[in-house]
Amino acid sequence: MITVLCLIAIAVGAAVFYVRPLWGLAALVAALPFERIGGFALNPAAGYPVVQPAQLVGAALVAAVAARLITRREHWQLSPTGWRRPSAVWWLVGLAAIAAVSAALIPYRQVWIDFVSGLFVMTLCLAVAQTAAAALNDNSEAARRRFFKLLLYGLFISAAAVCLFGLYQFVGDLLGLPVSLTGLRPQYTKAVFAFPRIQSTALEPLYFANYLLLPLVVSLAAFITTKRRYFLGLFGLIAITFTLTVSRGAVLGAVVALIILFMALRNSLNRKLWLRLGAATLVIAVLVAGGLGIVSLTNPSQGSKAVTTFVGLFGANFNQTGTLTDRLVAQRQAWDIFLEKPLIGHGVGGYTWRVLNYPAARTGGERIIVNNEPLELLTEVGVLGTLAYLGFLVTLLWGGLRAGLRASDPERRAWLVGLTAAIIAIWIQYLSFSGFFIVHIWVTYGLLLGFISAKTREDQTA
């Protein structure tokens, strides 16, 4: 019954998005953070497979874009040549082809299911890029403004909502609310570190932090280029929530992204902006410290432990945790598995089934990851597939940076530079976790691909 309802929802969404594709893009971006809270199992008894709202909206958008292209309602915008209409498309096609060959050589059905899942997120990336590029290439200035408006609403209303819910989780757990009300998993409550780690709607704090890198970096880029103060307010809200996820890999990625942002947008910075950014940073630091200070009010005996633990996790104890040891063990195992099939790997998702000794894997819902995406890519799609993925990524980032530095429109420039820096941050954190099918990452790729595939205003008036 649930499967039928999902198919009906996809069909209805596709019909709506066929007429209003930008609604589909905005709805998809808004649905990105809803993973654990908002997701549901198609088979409630087994708890698997879990479907996220973004996957349903994404499937509807893919269907709508395909229908619009087939009926010639719009033309293909992602010409796979040159830097501005990047060869990133060909790299992606190459990755899909290598993954298909790899899956065909594995005698286990689940690998094919994972291949289809991987093909879906790659197709979704292209559908997002096509929708964004088509909107930006519209001859009407009003249409382009509408695109920016809907994209901003979709990203930031959703991000603000899940950040506010995350702050509720933090305060609620400190005040003793049960996990049934806060939505926190037991391992992320104050019982562990004396303060809760914000998880919000995601399965893990690190996944939530990885998603937040997108609105965090884009909001700051938009403030620098447009000088609109509400972007600074959004950045502050997201930064506070982001910090309290205590995801160290994400924080490291964010630092690198902000450095890139300031270097790329240095011509837009002035003394007044620096003062506002400095004041915002001070406020963020005070509010984070105040959040930890609430621990002393609710449980005086744990107050000093909370501060010491928080500072230690970002200081002397940065690499001294049990999770790091577990990751190193998994990575050594992954390297040995990679050496078994170094050219094309064990198929997308194949690391799980190789570790579980396919074809005698235990359950369809069991998932084991390497916690290092480059290494997981090597085990699953081999050297050839990894090179194709990296070719796609490098082409995308180079195109984004090049187009961002040349863009004259402030909003377009903010998105180009912001998305480029956000992807770099995501990949820095990707060194400490993995997962080929994460929707928000492929949507971020698609948005950047769409922006660099669109004609500039100068091209359109030439």
Image: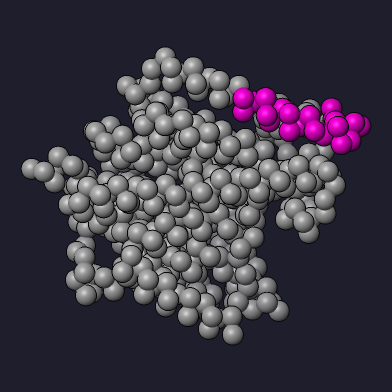
Q: Residue at x 36, y 75 (%)?
A: 15
Q: Residue at x 58, y 37 (%)?
A: 237
Q: Is 362 positioned to the left or the right of 405 in the image?
A: right
**289 inside magenta stretch:** yes
- Seen from the viewer's position, the closer of residues 314 and 291 is 291
Q: Is residue 397 visible?
A: yes
* 168 up-or-down from 260: above or below: below
Q: Where is residue 5? Give x, y as percent.
A: 54, 80
Rendering colour mode: one colour
- Seen from the viewer's position, the closer of residues 216 and 331 is 216
User: How many marks do you count on the picture?
Assistant: 0
Q: Is 366 positioned to the left or the right of 263 in the image?
A: right
Q: Which residues are magenta?
A: 283-304
Q: Where is residue 426? Give x, y as percent.
A: 49, 43
Q: Residue at x 87, y 36 (%)?
A: 298
Going by the picture, which residue comes out furthest to the front? 142
- Seen from the viewer's position, the closer of residues 322 and 341 is 322
* 126 up-or-down from 192: above or below: below
**462 inside magenta stretch:** no
Secondary structure that dominates the magenta span: helix
Q: Where is residue 318? Give x, y as percent.
A: 67, 32
Quarter assignment of residue 409: top left
Going by the picture, which residue comes out furthest to the top? 271
